[in-house]
């Protein structure tokens, strides 16, 4: 499924308009622990988290994730956004809590394995 | 395939540049045409060792050497050292302070992630002096 379809379907707000939203999403992973994401997410996954600081971009970039979704109305820190644009990592936000967002992504057919 | 070696310098508590060394290393490996599956393992192990230096040490350096046979990375830091390496290798064990945990670090998965994604791993540490983490990832299939 394309990232843009997911964004439209769940009314996610795109914080990095310049990032490539045509990429294929292969799954999703929910965690607020960065090493957990490093160890257990996979290339092409969406990452659902409440962490908004700069280092989430490094993790997403190194793991070649499809994007980061910040939940509970949390917005990215200013330097996070700047870095995400530099690294071409899509960052989206939603008022939904992580559980609800994960449930909706699951309903769309995404899995974490 | 070409060989390469080099070093990145790491500064303790410099969370702004955290991940930069691993990211640069990943770019170098991509430039050498290393298979993506191997680069993914290196990226995880390099990031974890880089973060350990940034979280715990005053400073450190990441040396890398790439040959047709293997990728070898040695991260040497000037930090507090690890008192009990066996305990530090245990999944979920961490000595990270609260503010580090709030950032989503200190889940006790760093060294286990390095071990899981490398072919050999050696950890040497002297309390009060520092820690050296060295790991290799094979490129040529072992016979």
Image: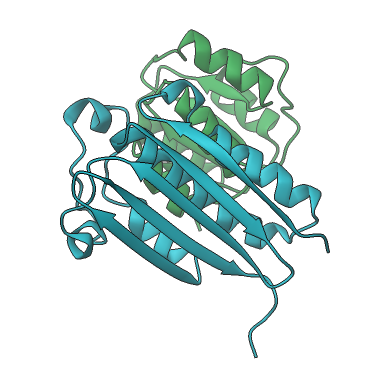
Q: From the top left corner, tell me how far across and down residue A63 is, in percent.
A: 57, 45
Q: Where is residue B29 in the image (x, y as percent from the top left)?
A: 71, 51
Q: Report which quarter residue B42 is drawn in.
A: bottom right
| Residue at the farthest bottom position | B143
- Asked if A61 appears above or below B91 in the picture, the reply is above
Q: Using residue A102 as the reference point, say whether residue B23 is left or right of it.
A: right
Q: In this view, does B55 lie to the left or right of B27?
A: left
Q: Which residue is drawn at 43% across and 65% down?
A: B116
Q: In this view, does A72 lie above or below A47?
A: above
- Foreground residue, B128 or A56? B128
Spot the green chain and give its letter: A
Give B89 or B3, whichever is nearer the viewer: B3
Residue at figure coordinates x 67%, y 20% from the top left: A86
Asked if one can make out residue A15 in the rendered structure from this viewpoint, the answer is no
Q: In this view, does B125 lie above or below A52?
A: below
Q: Residue at x 64, y 62 (%)?
A: B38
> Which tint is chain B?
cyan
B32 and B98: which is toward the camera: B32
Q: Is residue B60 left or right of residue B4?
A: left
Judged left or right of residue B111, residue B5 is right
């Amino acid at each position: 499924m394309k990232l843009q379809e997911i964004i439209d379907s769940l009314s996610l707000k795109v914080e990095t308009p310049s990032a490539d939203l045509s990429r294929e999403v292969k799954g999703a992973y929910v965690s607020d622990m960065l090493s957990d994401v490093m160890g257990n997410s996979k290339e092409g996954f969406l990452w659902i988290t409440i962490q908004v600081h700069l280092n989430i971009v490094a993790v997403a970039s190194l793991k070649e994730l499809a994007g980061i979704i910040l939940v509970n109305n949390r917005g990215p820190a200013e330097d996070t956004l700047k870095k995400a644009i530099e690294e071409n990592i899509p960052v989206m936000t939603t008022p939904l809590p992580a559980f609800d967002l994960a449930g909706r992504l699951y309903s769309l057919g995404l899995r974490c394995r | 395939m070409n060989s390469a070696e080099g070093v990145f310098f790491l500064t303790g508590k410099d969370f702004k540049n955290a991940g930069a060394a691993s990211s640069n290393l990943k770019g170098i490996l991509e430039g050498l045409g290393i298979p993506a599956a191997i680069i993914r393992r290196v990226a995880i192990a390099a990031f974890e060792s880089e973060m350990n230096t940034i979280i715990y040490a005053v400073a450190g350096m990441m040396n890398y050497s790439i040959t047709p046979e293997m990728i070898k990375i040695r991260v040497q830091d000037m930090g507090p050292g690890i008192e009990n390496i066996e305990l530090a290798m245990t999944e979920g064990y961490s000595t990270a302070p609260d503010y580090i945990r709030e950032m989503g670090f200190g889940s006790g998965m760093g060294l286990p992630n390095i071990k899981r994604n490398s072919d050999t791993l050696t950890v040497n540490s002297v309390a009060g002096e520092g820690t050296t983490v060295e790991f290799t990832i094979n490129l040529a299939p072992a016979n």
